[in-house]
Image: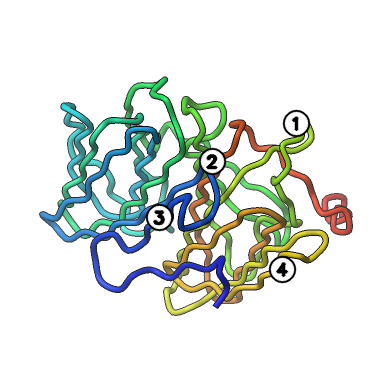
Amino acid sequence: MSPLLVKPRAGGGRVHHVTPKTARWTYVGFDLWKRKPGELATGTDGDRETCLVFISGRGSVRVGAEEYGILGGRSSPFEGRPWSVYVPPGMVWSVEATEDLVLAVCSAPGKGKFPPRVIAPDLLVQETRGKGSNVRHVTNILPEWEMAENLLVVEVLTPAGNTSSYPPHKHDEDNLPNESALEETYYHRINPPQGFAFQRVYTDDRELDEAMAVEDGDVTLVPRGYHPCAAIHGYELYYLNVMAGPRRTWKFHNAKEHEWLLKA
């Protein structure tokens, strides 16, 4: 199995736990919790900011001494926009599930510049990118124009049979204004869930070249290089992207041999 492919732990609780140490990089962390009604997901990190994303289900949210009530509501990530919560470094957060809950916990280094806040679905900007069989639908959860220190969070829905993160692009060089250096995780979901999708992560010199069959619930790591995805016929692909790096901006470089696709 590819070292860039992370399978979920069986059962409930914290089924994914990607840290800078386990990923062998510097910035991005990603956890995924599955909780039954009455069960708790909780955490804190003294030097990392966090974005909680309700993938599906509902839960009662507390950050520090503040109660935010019951958030969430969609039955799957393929239905509507998510509720999210921004948590600054050093604050304890908890979510008690009020129904079956899938909660993503996205993190990156921070110093505590911004207060906690709820990010409601109606605040999220949606856009459609690409054309033809390269169309995908993007929901910006924590884009660079919203308050955060390092985190960038976005979810993408790719129709069955379409490509995404395509034409191939990369963001692994700190070379602004042309390109930014960002680590990235993908949390993948497939609809219906017995399906699969494909992702390739590769560099120009092919020193890194990993092609992966991705199943429902998998996480893929993008430490560097191009990273296109493909949804197969009959199966929609959802993914949640978490990015962070030395500068909080998304500037990517397209693979030159495929740039003609942007003009076709």
Label count reads 4
Measured along the vertical axis of the image, is residue 130 above or below residue 189? above
| Residue highlighted by disc 2 | 126
Indicate which disc, 3 or 1, sits on the residue closer to the N terminus. 3
Tell me which corner region of the image, top left, top right, bottom left or bottom right, holds residue 52.
top left
The amino acid sitting under disc 4 is: Asp
The label on residue 79 is 3
* CB atoms of marks 3 and 2 within 8 Å: no
- Who's the residue at 35% across and 30% down the image? 89
- Who's the residue at 72% across and 50% down the image? 170
Local crowd size for mark 3, using a 10 Å CA cut-off: few (<14), some (14–19), many (≥20): few
Measured along the vertical axis of the image, is residue 93 above or below residue 197? above
* CB atoms of marks 3 and 1 within 8 Å: no
Local crowd size for mark 2, using a 10 Å CA cut-off: few (<14), some (14–19), many (≥20): some
| Residue highlighted by disc 4 | 209
Q: Residue furthest left?
A: 38
Indicate which disc, 1 or 4, sits on the residue closer to the N terminus. 1
- Viewer-proximal residue among 12 and 155: 12
The amino acid sitting under disc 3 is: Glu
Q: CA distance from mark 1 to mark 2?
A: 26 Å
Indicate which disc, 3 or 2, sits on the residue closer to the N terminus. 3
